Image (cartoon, helix red, strand yellow):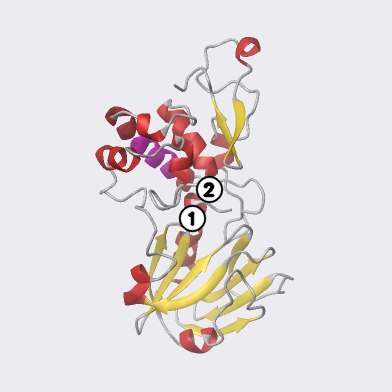
């Protein structure tokens, strides 16, 4: 599933390509996504001008005139393609947007994503967003704030970072990478973290996400940028998917430690260095 850096990269690419385009036409080729595309979707947004762009958690929002917003979620395998001309459509191209600045196509082989419209002034009360946690880049997210949120959490810190009701947008890759940079074991009970450790986690989450955004995200399976190119942050991963290898700062003996370890937490793979993380 695309995580925050991938979604931010896609949102920025859409904004750069479409700018303040007018939506000239929409063709819904298959409405059967995770949530069915509204039957009046095309009618509601046709001829509307795009006036802004936003990312909330892992959702992309295109704000339109007349108090409407398009909400896009890519699910597990969703992709966005942008091009000046339509070209040949592919098997899983479910929605085609024709705009005054070119075409945007939503493709989703597994159909776990969604595309719908909502009233812009009711976004934060919408079921998709009303229980979403704080954004990692929100200034309100501080070490003190995180410490308070974790004070009664008996789950692991890795699971807490994946809890979208606490901090939104952090996925499996970036939780492992952030905890490595923070030198904190992913198995630590969340409530056991000190004030200082919470400050460090906030810093390293932002550092990791910023680096990933600059690299265009991580391409491990399905993810592609809207121009068809791949992200390359996977080349900068310190621990994720590197079982048995030494971490970038390890001074320990690989034969004795076994290098980077992999465990499963709540059904998700976790990678860490048991020597450097405590």
Residue 110 left/right relative to 216: right
Determine the main secondary structure of the stretch shown in magenta: helix
Write down the quadrant of residue 33 in the picture. bottom right
- Give the residue displayed 42% in from the left and 77% down from the top: 118
Is 96 situated above or below 24? Answer: above
Local crowd size for mark 2, using a 10 Å CA cut-off: few (<14), some (14–19), many (≥20): many
Up-down relation of residue 187 to residue 102 (above or below)? above
Residue 105 colored in magenta in the image: no
Name the residue that disc number 2 marks: 217
Residue tagged 1: 9
Residue 218 x, y percent position in the rendering: 57, 45
- Marks 2 and 1: in contact by CB < 8 Å? yes
106 or 14: nearer the eye? Answer: 106
Where are the magenta residues, as a range?
201-210
Q: Position of residue 69 (x, y in %)?
A: 41, 76
Mark number for residue 74? none
The CA span between labels 1 and 2 is 7 Å
């Amino acid at each position: 599933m695309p995580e925050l850096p991938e979604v931010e990269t896609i949102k920025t690419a859409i904004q750069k390509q479409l700018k303040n385009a007018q939506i000239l036409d929409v063709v819904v080729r298959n409405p059967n996504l995770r949530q069915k595309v509204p039957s009046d979707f095309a009618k509601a947004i046709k001829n509307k001008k795009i006036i802004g762009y936003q990312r909330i958690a892992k959702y992309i929002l295109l704000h339109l005139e007349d108090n409407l917003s398009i909400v896009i979620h890519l699910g597990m395998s969703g992709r966005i393609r942008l091009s000046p001309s339509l070209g040949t459509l592919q098997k899983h191209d479910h929605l085609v947007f024709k705009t005054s600045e070119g075409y945007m196509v939503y493709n989703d082989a597994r159909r776990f994503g969604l595309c719908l419209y909502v009233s812009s002034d009711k976004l934060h009360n919408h079921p998709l967003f009303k229980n979403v946690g704080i954004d990692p880049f929100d200034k309100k997210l501080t070490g003190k704030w995180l410490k308070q949120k974790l004070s009664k959490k008996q789950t692991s810190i890795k699971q807490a970072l994946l809890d979208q009701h606490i901090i939104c947008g952090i996925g499996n890759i970036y939780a492992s990478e952030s905890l490595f940079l923070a030198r904190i074991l992913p198995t630590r009970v969340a409530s056991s973290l000190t004030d200082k450790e919470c400050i460090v986690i906030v810093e390293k989450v932002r550092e990791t996400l910023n680096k990933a955004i600059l690299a265009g995200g991580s391409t491990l399976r399905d993810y592609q940028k809207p121009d068809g190119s791949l992200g390359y942050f996977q080349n900068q991963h310190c621990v994720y998917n590197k079982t048995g290898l030494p971490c970038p700062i390890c001074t320990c003996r690989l034969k004795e430690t076994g290098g980077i370890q992999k465990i499963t937490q709540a059904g998700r793979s976790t990678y860490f260095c048991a020597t450097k993380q405590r």
